[in-house]
Amino acid sequence: PDSKERRMRFRAVPVPPPGESWPEQETILLLTEAQVHAGIKAAELELKHRAITASDGNPFSGASGDHVTLIPVDAEEGNTATKDVHGRIVGYDNVVLEDDDEVEYRILVLPESGDSREAFWASLDIRADTASYVCQPVG
């Protein structure tokens, strides 16, 4: 015997904000059970997304950036007085330099250890001799 389960259908009714009157129902919107469940899931995801970005409006808050280790160029030349900086990339920016209209790529680094835990901007460049990335603090 073939038995088919009947799915529930729901009538969608607009709910006015507090203090406003109920609008007249001109058209009736019927939703299937699957549409209702999809709407509930979408609302849950939206609430979760809003909770993450609500702290300061930064969509990256709550997420961790790429871990980087900045090694001073002097260390490659035998000067061991300077220390490596371990941190996370927490932002980026592209700046057009006024004197030659060249684009400078910058990253915002938040140190994880050391004396200063204050974030700083560093410009990115590529060394011609080794094709490795070089970061220099801006300013």
Image: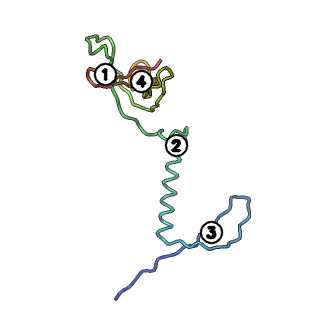
Q: The disc labelled 3 sits on which kind of residue?
A: Val
Structural crowding at the residue carrying mark 1, measured as other residues with C-alpha within 10 Å and reported as few (<14), some (14–19) or many (≥20): few
Percent x, y for residue 130?
26, 22
Judged from the image, the secondary structure of the residue bearing numbered disc 2 is helix
Percent x, y for residue 100?
46, 22
Q: The disc labelled 4 sits on which kind of residue?
A: Ser
Disc number at residue 127? 1
* Residue closest to the far front: 100
Figure check: 61 above or below 73: below
Disc number at residue 123? 4
- The number of numbered badges drawn on the structure is 4
Q: CA distance from mark 2 to mark 1?
A: 37 Å
Q: Residue at x 48, y 23 (%)?
A: 97
Q: CA distance from mark 1 to mark 4?
A: 13 Å
Q: CA distance from mark 2 to mark 3?
A: 30 Å
Query: Which circle, 4 or 2, is nearer the viewer?
Result: 4
Percent x, y for residue 59?
49, 41
Judged from the image, the secondary structure of the residue bearing numbered disc 4 is strand
> Which quadrant of the rendered structure holds the N terminus?
bottom left
- Tell me, yes or no, whether the two marked residues, 2 and 3, touch with CB atoms within 8 Å: no
Q: Circle 3 is placed at which residue position?
A: 13
Judged from the image, the secondary structure of the residue bearing numbered disc 1 is loop
- Tell me, yes or no, whether the two marked residues, 2 and 1, touch with CB atoms within 8 Å: no
Figure check: 109 above or below 20: above
